[in-house]
Amino acid sequence: MPTHNKLVRDRIPEIIAGTGKKYSTRILDQSEFIKELRKKSFEELEEYMNANNHEEALEELADLLEIIHALAESHSASIGKVEELRKNKAVKRGKFKEKIFLIQVDD
């Protein structure tokens, strides 16, 4: 039986059970959950970076977005609050629409 030791989506145990396989899980406490969400975000970001086409890239972005939703909730905030912060930063500092690549700043 392979050992995974990683955070999985809520329906994964149900899906595994549907194949007739046995599995073991445990429920994380809040600090473990945040730690594992952070690890999962790196895993999904790496999968995004390795995507070979737009479809794969969008699938991985959807996974990252799901993690961002869960992280917001774990910090007692809604995704709406995160979106509000994003919009405020966009007004103050801009977005990434103009594709500006900073080379250097002279002191």
Image (tube, helix red, strand yellow):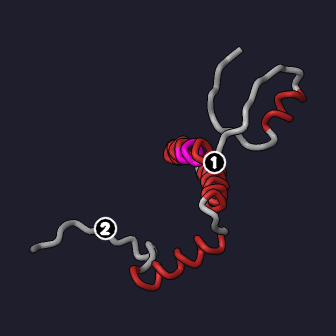
Relative to 58, is 18 on the left or the right? right
Label 2: which residue? 101
Q: Is residue 81 magenta?
A: no
| The image quarter in which residue 18 lies | top right
Towards the viewer: 53 or 31: 31
Q: Which mark is residue 93?
A: none
Rendered residue at 39%/80% (across/down): 93
Relative to 84, is 20 on the left or the right? right
Label 1: which residue? 30
Under mark 2, the amino acid is Phe
Vertically, is 69 above or below 10?
below
Q: Which residues are magenta?
A: 34-38
Figure quadrant of the C terminus:
bottom left
Q: Is residue 36 magenta?
A: yes
Relative to 74, is 89 on the left or the right? left
Q: Position of residue 50 (x, y in %)?
A: 51, 42
Towards the viewer: 65 or 85: 85
**Residue 51 appears anywhere in the view:** no
Q: In 3D space, how far apart are the residues under numbered discs 1 and 2 (Cα atoms)? A: 38 Å
